[in-house]
Each structure stands twice: as C-alpha cells, then as structure tokens.
Amino acid sequence: MAESVKKYSKNEILEVTITDIGNDGEGIGKIDGYTLFIKDAVIGDTVRCKIMKAKKNYAYARLEEVIVPSEYRIRPACTISTRCGGCQIQSMSYERQLQFKQDKVRNNIVRLGGFDGDEIDSKMETIIGMDEPFRYRNKAQYPVGLNKEGKIVTGFYAGHSHNIIPSKECIIGIEENGIILDTIVGHMEANHISPYDEETGRGLVRHILIRKGFVSKEIMVCLIINYKGRNASGDYIPSQEQLCNKLSQIEGMKSISVSINTEKTNVIMGNEIHTIWGSDTITDTLCGLKFNISPLSFYQVNPVQTEKLYGTALEYAELTGNETVWDLYCGIGTITLSMSRKAREVYGVEIIPQAIDDARENARVNGITNASFYVGKAEEVLPRLYEEENIYADVICIDPPRKGCDQAALDTMLKMAPKRIVYVSCDSATLARDLRILVDGGYSIDKIRPCDMFSWSVHVETVVSLTLQDDKK
Ligand code: SAH
C-alpha cells in the first residue's frame, strides 16, 4: 500500500526545488510526494513559497522568494508580467520556453493519445521558434477605465478578472500603441469624456482596438463606444475632428473608426462600425496573398510565425498541382488560398458567414478562381456533401478551434479517405485525442512540428501530417 502523504495547510511556508512545469506555465515542486504548484516559479529554482489552497495530495502556493535562481530564470522584460493576465512565463528564458512547448506537445500526444514515446520522438521535428520574440502582435485591444484616484487608465486585465492593470507599453505589441493610447486618453481628459463603467453601464469609451499591417505598415484605430447618440455636430465622440487630426499624424495611420457596443457584455466589439477618418480597411500581405482587414475581420495576430506555420502545413501537404484539397475550419481562407496555387481545386468550410464573405473577397482580390467556400459546421457540411454529392479529397487540411474536431467530421474524413491529412492545432490535448481516432481509422503519423506563435505565454501550435496506410487505400 502507498504510504500516505503528509498534507500541508494554508499559510504554511515551505522551501522547495522546482522540477517540472505545469500546463499553465507554473513551477511544480514536490516534498515527499506532496505536489506544489507555484505560479511564476521557474524550473530549476529553489524557492520559498506560501500555501494558499491545500488539498490532500497537492497545493497551490504563492512564490515568496527565489532562494537559488534557476539557470533558466531571467528578469522579465515587462514590469507588470506577474500581474497581467496576458503572459505566463516571462521569467523563463526564451530557449527554455521553446523546450517546454516541444515537450508539452510530445507528452500530450504520447499520454493523451496513447502513442509509443519512441515512435512519437522519431516523428517530432524541432519547434519553430521566433527570431524576434518581442513586438510580434499586430493587434491589441486595450480596455479603458478609471483607477482608484479617478484617473483614466488603459491597460490589460489581470488574470481571471476585469481589473485593469495600467499599461501603455506591451513588449509583444507594436511600438505605436503607446502614442495612440496617450493621444486618445489625452483627448478624453481634455474633453471630459468618461470611460465606460461595467458596473453602471455608464460612460463612453470601452476599448481601443489597434491593428497594424506588418508588411503594409498601415495602422487602424477603432474606439469601441457605448454610444448614446451623435451630438449636435454629428460626432460620435466629443471634438471628434480634433481627435482624428491628432491621431492621423501618427505615421502609418490609415483608418479611424468607432464600433458601437451598448450591451452589458464581455464581447468587446459591437457589430456597427462607422469610419470617422480615412479608409474603412487596412491591407496587408500574408503567405503571398493580399488581405483587406476591417475592424471586425479575423486576421492572424502573429503574421511572421503564421507564415511559418502555414508554410509548414503547405510543405506537409506535398501538393503537385493536381490535387483536390479540402480545408476545414478555414476562417478567412488563409490556408485554403495559399494551397490553391499548388492544387487543382480547393474547398473551404467555416462556421462564421462573415469570415466566408472575407474568404471569397480575398480569393477575388488575389485573382484566385479555383477556390470555393461553404458556410456551416464542418461536422454538418462535410457529411452532407459526402452523402449528397459524393465529394472527394486528395488532401484534407484542418485547423480547428481549441476543442478540436467533432466526431462526425472525423468519421466523414475517414470515409473520404484522402491520401493525406494535415492537422494544424492550437491545443495539443485535443490534437492527441483526434490523432488517436485518425490512426485507429487507418492513418499513420509522418511528421509533427510545433510552432511558437505566442512567446511568453504557454500556448503552442502544432502541424501534423498523416498518410493513409497502403492496406486501407
Ligand atoms: N486557418 C484559419 C483560422 C482557423 S481558426 C485562418 O487562417 O483564417 C479556427 C476556425 O474554425 C475559426 O475561424 C472558427 O470560426 C471556425 N470554427 C469553429 N467551429 C467550427 C465548426 N464546428 N465548423 C467549422 N468551422 C468552425
């Protein structure tokens, strides 16, 4: 019989060496079989910690002091790293983060998918890291509120809350964010414009959305407002022209708009958009394709790594120019369209009608004529088309949301029996589950390659290629 483990209790102070990293990036240490999860502790650290919540075999503890720092511990580049909900592993060196993500993908596939460790190791390629892990995000959404002294602040929400941690600077965002926020906050102060208050539903400015095309250098600003009617001069914001004059002086400014959101909701954007200066959209180039981006369009937030991720998917698809390709969960068609140039015909399926409108427009803008798109759930559209039209695929590419693929979608893919499946995943746990189903259905895994799209956070993307085994053809 296993010896019972001593249980520790709340507020106890312990010293422990961190030997592992949890799924949320927290440090994990053990004392005689009792496990401690400690946020902001880095693997290799010896720390003093205080127990916050104790269970029978484990506890969550707070980092009190780093006694001996790990060789992987670095000074966070950002001053609010431990409070802001955006990044989790800013105290870990970038090299060690990449190793953590490589291991996370590998271990999830082995443990949750029930695969042999050595076999998976032989298929894993090295994670694609970033050459420059800072300033990679082309989009930011800053909440606007008041601090305790009644001053207007913008920043980021603390983890699991709506408390704004004031910050104008974010090391993963573009440099222009700071000046844009200063300009808007300065204008609000000068004109007595109040930020929105979630409690009372009063106040005007809720969020500030900023986007930049990294190739085009064009910038878009959208103020999300709790609109109470245009004023006598037809403005959405007091002294609107003055604000636009100031913002339009910032290099690259191309589009300024407002988005109306009067709902008491966590959804940031409202669907009604009015351009108040410049163009309705900015343009950018991604994977050799031109995109028009409106405040509501979905667009990948890390364009540099997206090109590498989707480039890997394209490489894994091994297209020769004769293939019929289906791209499920296609969004605005980035993968579909980038594959269209190397395939005979491509078909995209996506649940959001607006994204499909964008995908069709993107095909048109880029002169692509061999791409067709369907609106609907992959798990409904694919089985229906298979039953009614006996659709065929040489290659199926999938890029589902975190919850992975629905069983009905996987079943139909297995019936369609394409020679190759390329799976792009943003959650290696659901990837592992789906890989098991595809392998049991007759596919074998060829290659697995993680890709880091979000440095300083625990997220990791993965591309997997699978081939239909000979006896199943
Ligand atoms: N490759 C895409 C992004 C994929 S993100 C691009 O570059 O644009 C995952 C997409 O799956 C999202 O666009 C989401 O709207 C869509 N989606 C979510 N559930 C779906 C379902 N059941 N069927 C089809 N699409 C779905």
Image (cartoon, rainbow, N blue to C red):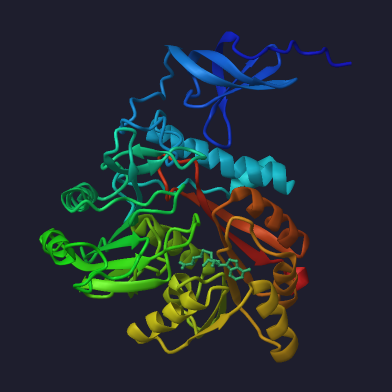
Q: Nearer the viewer, residue 332 or 152?
A: 152
Q: Quadrant of residue 105?
A: top right
Quadrant assignment for the N terminus: top right
From the top left corner, tell me how far across and down residue 217 is, in percent.
Answer: 20, 63
* 44 lies left or right of 3: left
63 vs 428, left or right, is left
Pick the front one: 67 or 308: 67
Relative horizontal placement of residue 125, taking residue 81 as reference (left or right): right
Does residue 86 show up? yes
Q: Which of 309 and 190 lies nearest the eye of the viewer?
A: 190
- Residue 401 position (above or below residue 124): below
- The residue shown at (39%, 86%) is 368
Residue at 70% x, 63% y is 443
In percent of width and height, residue 263 lies at 47, 62
Taking the image in four quarters, ligand 1 sits in the one at: bottom right
Percent position (x, y) of residue 259? Answer: 35, 67
The residue at the far front in this view is 232
- Location of residue 351 with respect to 462 vertically, above or below: below
* Residue drawn at (70%, 53%) of the image: 433
